[in-house]
Amino acid sequence: MAADSAANVVDTQVNSSTGKISLYEGSTQYKSWRYSPEQLEHIRTSLNVAAVAAIRNTFEADESGSSSNVLFLDAGEEQLLVKLYITKIPQLCGHFRFPEEVEATAISYLKRFYLKNTVMDWHPKNVMLTTLFLATKTTNNPISLESYTSNIPKTSSSDVLDLEFLVSQSLNFELAVWHAHRALWGIWLDLQSLPDVTEDLRPQNVYDIAIKHVRASRFTDAELLYTPAQIALASLALASPLLAQRWADSKAPPGSTQPLSETMEPTLGVIKYIITQMGHPPDVEAVREVDRRLKLCKNPEKVPGSKAYLARQAEEQRRAEEKRHKKAEDVRRAITESNPFGNELNDDEKATQLAELDDDDD
């Protein structure tokens, strides 16, 4: 994991006297949604390769040779399209006046969804709308489905509801998210209590600049690689290296021979690079080209009205019907073959129950 040894003292401290782990270490985010860069690349590449193979087979089953001229998306192009729709979430949140917690949570959901699925199966537009609607509920900022969809052009209730269970399932129903903007606020409050940080050293514009860097980090993979506190501290370091240094050094464990700011510098340097170099919207023309090609290589089983879609629906209905028949047959057999008053006890069972009654009397 990315530089855990250098950052554990910041946000995953263990109380040496009680042995208790921090709340963050006990979270599903810490256990399930943190990766190394190599792991992320492997997950996305594997998903892409599997999707291309499955879609190619579907094309070939419908018409032999039909997939030979199809230019499928690669994993990088898929991420480019997902990134575009990540940048749409802040715009929608501004339109609805949703708080920052909703925006950050929806973005996290969208990123996590595409660690289990590909854009060739599920287009990011409706997935993005679904993750945002889900985030309003999980962060306790609910809005009615009608009010939500009626304010988004060309969107129906089914566009959101049809995917809500799939999205939740893809998230493993792990809906709590720890965010860097909350960590940054905690650091900012901490700075106010440090004796060597006067009010002149921490003007409000430093926090304003730092929170902009936190927001930019949402357009990157930072939250999948690093902890919220690491991202928050890197964002503060971009706004004020001095404040970041003094806060980090104040968290050094007793007896440390090296300032914590020096220990963490390699990690923070990588995060700062990610934020400044990748924390911006993608090129719109490049994304348009990807989206145009997606129309030609989308999984036909997910396109309503296509032969593959209708065949899949028919197969699912057949399986559901078989399941219903089997269940009905099991119920019928249970009724006709079993004694409604229970089976008669054999001699051994009678002896066991009598012994138990004798024990109770004692």
Image (tube, rainbow, N blue to C red):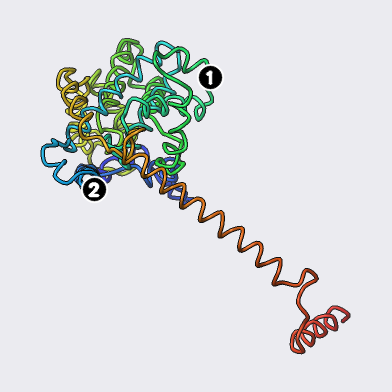
Residue visible at 24% across and 33% down in the picture: 261
Task: Give the labeled residue for mark 2.
Answer: 61
Q: Is residue 23 above or below residue 154?
A: below
Residue visible at 37% across and 40% down in the picture: 310
Task: Please count the marks in the image.
Answer: 2
Can you give x and y, in whole percent of width and height, for residue 73 in the image?
17, 35
Residue visible at 31% across and 41% down in the picture: 308
Give the side of residue 352 with respect to residue 124, left or right.
Answer: right
Can you give x and y, in whole percent of width and height, for residue 283 in the image?
16, 19
Query: Mark 2: few, some, or many residues within 10 Å (few <14, many ≥20)?
Result: few
Residue visible at 31% across and 44% down in the picture: 255
Instruction: Using the rendered view, name the quadrant where residue 300 is placed.
Output: top left
Q: What element carries label 2?
A: helix
Query: Mark 1: few, some, or many residues within 10 Å (few <14, many ≥20)?
Result: some
Q: Is mark 1 on a helix, strand or loop?
A: loop
Q: Are marks 1 and 2 in contact (CB under 8 Å)?
A: no
308 or 276: nearer the viewer:
308
